[in-house]
Image: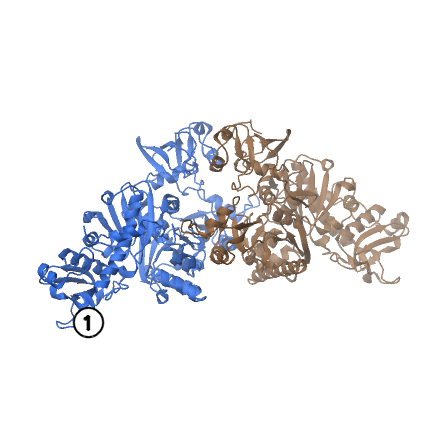
Chain colours: A blue, B brown
Amino acid sequence: MTERGAEHDGTGRVDLSFTVDEAQRTVRVPPGVTVFDAASWNGIAIDSTCGGHGTCHKCKVRVEGSTPITRHDVKTFTREQLDAGWRLACLVNATRDLAVDVPPLTTRPKAATVGVGRQVILRPAIQKRYVELDEATLADQRTDLARLLEAIDDLEPVPDLHVLRRLPTVLRRADFKVTAVVVDEALVDVEPGDTTRTAYGIAFDLGTTTVVATLLDVSTGTPVAVASMLNRQQPFGGDVITRISATMLDPDALGRLRTAACETLAVLAEQVCTEGGVDPAHVYEVALAGNATMTALALGIDPEPLGVAPFVMSTAQPPDLLAADLGLALHPRARVTLFPALGAYVGGDIVAGMLATGMDRDKRTRLFIDVGTNCEIVVSDGDRILSTAAPAGPAFEGGAIRCGMRAADGAVEVVKLGEGVELGVIGDVEPKGLCGSGLVDAVAELVKVGLLDASGRYVADDVAKEIAPSLADRLTYLGQERVFVLHRPTPDAEPEDCVVLSQRDVRELQFAKAAISTGWTLLLEELGLEHRDVQQVLLAGSFGSYLSAASAVRIGLVPKLPVLRIVAAGNVAGEGAKMALLSVRERAGARALLEEVTYVELSDRADFNDLFVDQLSFGG
Amino acid sequence: MTERGAEHDGTGRVDLSFTVDEAQRTVRVPPGVTVFDAASWNGIAIDSTCGGHGTCHKCKVRVEGSTPITRHDVKTFTREQLDAGWRLACLVNATRDLAVDVPPLTTRPKAATVGVGRQVILRPAIQKRYVELDEATLADQRTDLARLLEAIDDLEPVPDLHVLRRLPTVLRRADFKVTAVVVDEALVDVEPGDTTRTAYGIAFDLGTTTVVATLLDVSTGTPVAVASMLNRQQPFGGDVITRISATMLDPDALGRLRTAACETLAVLAEQVCTEGGVDPAHVYEVALAGNATMTALALGIDPEPLGVAPFVMSTAQPPDLLAADLGLALHPRARVTLFPALGAYVGGDIVAGMLATGMDRDKRTRLFIDVGTNCEIVVSDGDRILSTAAPAGPAFEGGAIRCGMRAADGAVEVVKLGEGVELGVIGDVEPKGLCGSGLVDAVAELVKVGLLDASGRYVADDVAKEIAPSLADRLTYLGQERVFVLHRPTPDAEPEDCVVLSQRDVRELQFAKAAISTGWTLLLEELGLEHRDVQQVLLAGSFGSYLSAASAVRIGLVPKLPVLRIVAAGNVAGEGAKMALLSVRERAGARALLEEVTYVELSDRADFNDLFVDQLSFGG
């Protein structure tokens, strides 16, 4: 905090006090952000059509005290207004605490609901403007480009060679009645006639396992079609480490992994366009959220430094790309926006997830967990945000589990123990194995009935008979190892033909959950908080959606909270990608997270191992 | 002019009063340029290594009065210094008259002489920085890119995908000792080890007839190799109009003209690299100056609107390109900087020429003429600059002239008449024809001796015998037409086997020179000036270099000035391209010319035809 009126030294936050309709509201933002951004990120609407590029001259506010005057201000305001503090909000940098008057809106902004209950004011990077131009004369020899851009009063896009090659021909064939297609600051096309109604983008969630594409009408915020498929990189390995290893063993593997990722995206893009009845040439932008390894592989960047200590990314903010660079047959100049990453194991997918869940806006103390082979954890106390990654191992994805399988038909996903065993099975078919949520349920229930003790060991047969007589016969041996039989295909089936939970499986889950709970415990400690201070837990990803909140609490995967405070947040990475397509302000918010979120590396912490051992227990 | 302290309304000029070493100097610049640019353009040196991007924090000046404080100022100066008016010169926009104190230089800038006696302070867009980086550790997991960029303290370049793909590999193979290659604001490569000594650019003068390439060592400003050849577009026609017509008649011609231009550039690029012993991969930038048609054809932009009234360009400022877009096999991310154009017939070549001749810096009243099929004319009175184009026709290039030929071996380039005829012939061989400078000389000399009258008609035989008895027998007939025999291959050769100047040839020259002198006369009138106010005439292009100043004055092609004030400026377009490679400030100066120079269209002026008829005469 700085004294109002003093310049800020560039660290910490500044306070902006907005007055809207006589109500006052103060927000804290990192120094240097514009007043316009600070307002948008906090849901305070200010008129604008250019999205903060200083070109539409509509975001008028009155700022208290002396504030620099830009050339756009000089064009917009009278000398008296300038003296009275009127400025364009998108050009005022909040380098100190400021008081800002916001006039009533002249237009009502359109909004869409995306993410976890987030209202997003529509301001897509894709903008279309239909114009009817005067033809050139000897008295008006303005260039084709100047004629076009001067007719678009609120944007100042930059053309590339592709547009300039088309411009003279399209203008003259269309009798100078054309639609300019702008993406961010680029003029990507000039189309004959009025095409303002057709403006589409595709949001990709590029997962290690599954890739999801959503085709969005960005002018309304409406999803038009959704499709998903397995990542075609699967044959190279199920998780990021095996895929990185593949590139280290074979010099051609990087190229092939890149091709596999691009093919996956291309198949999905074609599928959503076909399903939505949309010409791929009308898709002008793609937003893509993926972890750091998936992003590097899709871009053809060597992922080896991500896979070995000290786990270094080539860049946190991926470069500007064309969709064609990813092999996507959309508009030839369609652009790609990628999410920035916080670390080698807290990637763009998590940043997208933070955006979708509003981790940086909510004043509550919240814990965000994306459970997977690599588990990403974010904690916010409403002011500071910390993140880390915990190596949970493959247990939650069915890996290294005797009867483990992915969440597909035949996977046990719900387990309830009472007089007998009650199973929920995906696809309502004969149980074939155990997926992550079934594993967590099984262990939680076995702990609850007492067949597993606090240390995670199966109790002796005599103890079992005493505390759970109707289940005790399911506790048996498979070779030398103790197992609990969850499902017998036939009454006299041998244990090796049954769906069982082995002692080693329990150990795998213990290690996985200890890695995760050690992670969030250390982050809470960093913030001076205890478990009970957490007001909400967000479980992200498809696994999070299926996990029983009660079981997660019982095994200690999440803090001991009332289950209603544990929220399955769903595919937040995909939701974040949709938000980025619908709002350049939200996109800027994602970039701002790079500054706002502190990445905490756990692997070199002295207290990690001690705490990890404590967290192995199911007791308490 | 505005009152000091008042904001400027965006038109006219502002006065900046610089104090350097206790000496004071006031310069006038368009409002909105930075103090740093205003100083550089006027030869006032201010410390800087980043070239005005606000990143090196070295261009410290003290500005009188209240000036906005940027975040870079806050990082650079103490509160007391800010209060005392210290600012970074590259971030202060001169929106009003300002007094600026410039401290003594801490480093002596390197300079090179290019253009027409211009001293250019070396600040190429190509910048190399050798860095030795710390390797990453768990305690320092900065990304590869952040590690690199933080080691380069004065530049903040943006990487593209190409560099990010190489970065992890190159850093690790080179033990984190690498050279960053920056062009303008782009990080174009990371090279192993220290390669700071190898930094090259190629300046192209893309002429309609001849294309010239100069390979420059941009770190020293030294030309390494020069090569020239005929433009391979020649088979499509000798001038811009015939080439534009070719594209209108054949839909494939644009593509073929583009290929021909690119091939010409590629052949020359290879030639200068071979001759200079330079690896083409060490050429990181290309500067190209060409007229509007040559530029459009090289870029593959339909030139038709340039060729028909109202003569409209697609854009005045061509887009950013890669050399690869022009088919040049240089560094794969080598960039191209193109000159902006003022009009369809005052193109990038003329803007480059204005830069090379300092048309916007000199306080004298100067007339710049680039003589060719299309003749470009620029007049400056030291404050306002006007330009126009005059359709001179092909006479100066030997076209439409009976014995006309290009300036090649056998062309008569000098003619003197006395007792006999004295000829200067290119290549010292038997005369074969007459090139442009020989044509002007011949007409001027014939006017001088009186064989041509003021109206441009050959005198009658009896008059000829009286006033020039030793020459009179050369005045004869070829068919029905009067001709003057300049060279007889054998004593009894028939006129059709001789090099002659026909009555029609004289008419062609009359029309050409009238078009040109009408042009500059009208521009001078616009500025309220007369012929005698012109202090210097610059004749640009190879034709200008060969033209006899005395003959040009005699036929009225240029104002009647002492011949020493008529300067053959040479290949100023090529010189301008070299300046653009050596100095980003000069390049910005070229862009500023778009605002500073007013294009005057002659073809719709009511007084054009009357004046044209007056100018046909050789009299006076």
Residue B314 seen in render: no
Residue A308 seen in render: yes
Residue kind at label 1, given as amino acid type = Asp
Residue picked out by circle 1? A497
Q: Which residue appears at 37% of the width and 37% of the height?
A: A13
Q: Which residue appears at 15% of the width and 69% of the height?
A: A488
- Give residue A333's position: percent from left, percent from top: 45, 56
Query: Please, what secondary structure does the residue beneath circle 1 have?
Result: helix
Q: Nearer the viewer, residue B526 or B326?
A: B326
Q: Residue B300's image quarter?
A: bottom right
Vertical placement of residue A207 versus B345, above or below? below
Please give left or right for residue A273 compared with residue B237 in the image: left
User: Around disc 1, counting alpha carbons within 10 Å, would you say few (fewer than 14), some (14 to 19), or many (20 or more)?
Assistant: some
Q: Nearer the viewer, residue A136 or B43?
A: B43
Numbered marks: total: 1
- Give residue A66's position: percent from left, percent from top: 44, 29
Please give left or right for residue A488 compared with residue A99 in the image: left
Q: Residue A282's image quarter?
A: bottom left
Vertical placement of residue B248 versus A566, above or below? below
- Give residue A48's position: percent from left, percent from top: 39, 40
Please give left or right for residue A559 compared with residue B446 in the image: left
- Give residue A115's position: percent from left, percent from top: 29, 49
Quadrant for the C terminus of chain B, please: top right
Subunit bearing disc 1: A
Please give left or right for residue B534 compared with residue A555 in the image: right
Quadrant for the N terminus of chain B, please: top right
Q: Nearer the viewer, residue B344 or B383?
A: B383
Vertical placement of residue A259 versus B475, above or below? below
